Amino acid sequence: MIKVGLVSLGCPKNLVDSEIALGLLSSPPFRITSRLEEAEVLIVNTCAFLESARRESIDTIRRLAGYKKKRCRFLIVAGCLVQYLKDEAAAKLPEGDFYLGVGELTRLPRLMEKLFSGTPPRERIFCRDTPDFSFSRRFPRILSTPAHYAYLRIADGCDNRCSYCLIPGLRGPLRSRPPQRVIEEANELVSSGVRELILVAQDTTAYGIDLGKKQLLVSLLRSLEEIREMRWLRILYSHPAHLNKQIVRTMAESDKICPYLDIPLQHISERILKLMGRKISRIRVEKLLEQLREMVPGISLRTTLMVGFPGESGGEFEELSDFVRRQAFEHLGVFCYSPEKGTAAFRFGPPVDAATARRRRQHLMEIQQKISSRKLLRFQGKKIPVLLDGPFPEKGSKLMIAHSRFQAPEIDGLVVVEGDDVKPGDIRTVKISDSSSYDLYGIVAD
């Protein structure tokens, strides 16, 4: 048996690619191992969205290369960093042996058969100029998340062309999966024990636009709701310009779609939004948020913001700070602008200096910490359903960690649960006894 270890970096979309790779290598002569020191082949699925992500990918590659001094015979570098470097991948990442761009992980079984049969291919880099992962085929998949929730990819690529973003170059144009393929995979996942499905894509709300069907997401959501054993359905990565009233109404009418929405807004200054190419105005953003809260009472909103964009003035940052205070999002993340060669924003001139951008990020997160603390206080004394994820990581603890319908696993805060006869995958009612800045604490009450 050929033992294979895999490290996945980056976002949940990348994780789905990694899970497909594990599925392709799950039968003889391959055997998946989580003990990297035992692996004869190591694979790292990289991220290249930002400079910080590329640094993490390079550091991981160098760390895994150290296992070549032990049992590892081949190190395969895959994913977005290879797509970013293309023909330069081997020269820039000499620790690797073979390099697979985005959408090329399906080559792994054949490539490894050649490696271990003594007839390695002459070519070391497999990377197309435009990624084109086939959604017409069905691939096996091994979940790396807890068995009770899974990411369900409904599309890949992006046509938005935001001025700061590398994604269209790394992942290709928008390609929506046929609804029937999505529904088939959803049924398979639920049959295997998954209770919560989390829809992901580069832009989930653009689903179907490339097929000439602007309301295809609404139809898909209604079909997924009919899966009997699925309890929760969650939507991530929804672009505000594509989020319409029909989608919101479908959420409001559903018992299964979580009252939760991830809407990356990036900024609120009219000028900055135009420079970013976000295709939405401040007025429309504010009307959208108002509509969401009116139509889906109690909805939990997450957003992502960017500071330090080229030309962002102190006044525009104050405008953003005031917006965060007034909107009081349940969950918020902030990152500093990263100048990416090949994007339109790279030609806009120098960004705000790094120290100022970091201070701005810290300021927004301090505002958000107070907002989150205040909002979580409202849960104290209330009973809410939670999905139990696993044991609390502290050694010897009898506590469990869980997440509610208002929290995305691995992304937002969590619920720390005390109670007997509980196990991962259970949906239990918990009475909230305490809260912190981002987490809730409670006791099983059903």
Image (cartoon, rainbow, N blue to C red):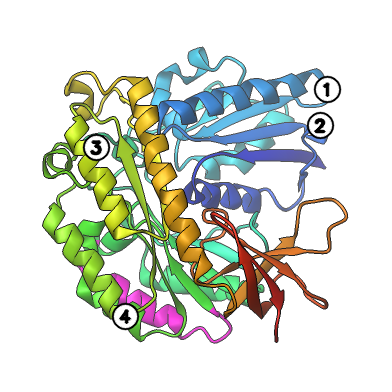
Q: Which residue is mark 3?
A: 317
Q: Earlier in the sequence, mark 1 or mark 4?
A: 1
Mark 2 nearby-residue class (10 Å; few <14, some 14–19, many ≥20): some
Mark 1: secondary structure: loop
Q: Which residue is mark 2?
A: 37
Q: Earlier in the sequence, mark 1 or mark 2?
A: 2
Q: Is residue 18 above or below residue 342?
A: below
* Numbered disc total: 4
Q: Earlier in the sequence, mark 4 or mark 3?
A: 4
In contact (CB < 8 Å): disc 4 and disc 3 = no
Q: Earlier in the sequence, mark 3 or mark 2?
A: 2
Q: Earlier in the sequence, mark 2 or mark 4?
A: 2
Q: Which residue is mark 4?
A: 250
Instruction: Look at label 4 and name its amino acid.
Output: Thr
Q: Residue at x 21, y 74 (%)?
A: 245
Q: Residue at x 35, y 59 (%)?
A: 328
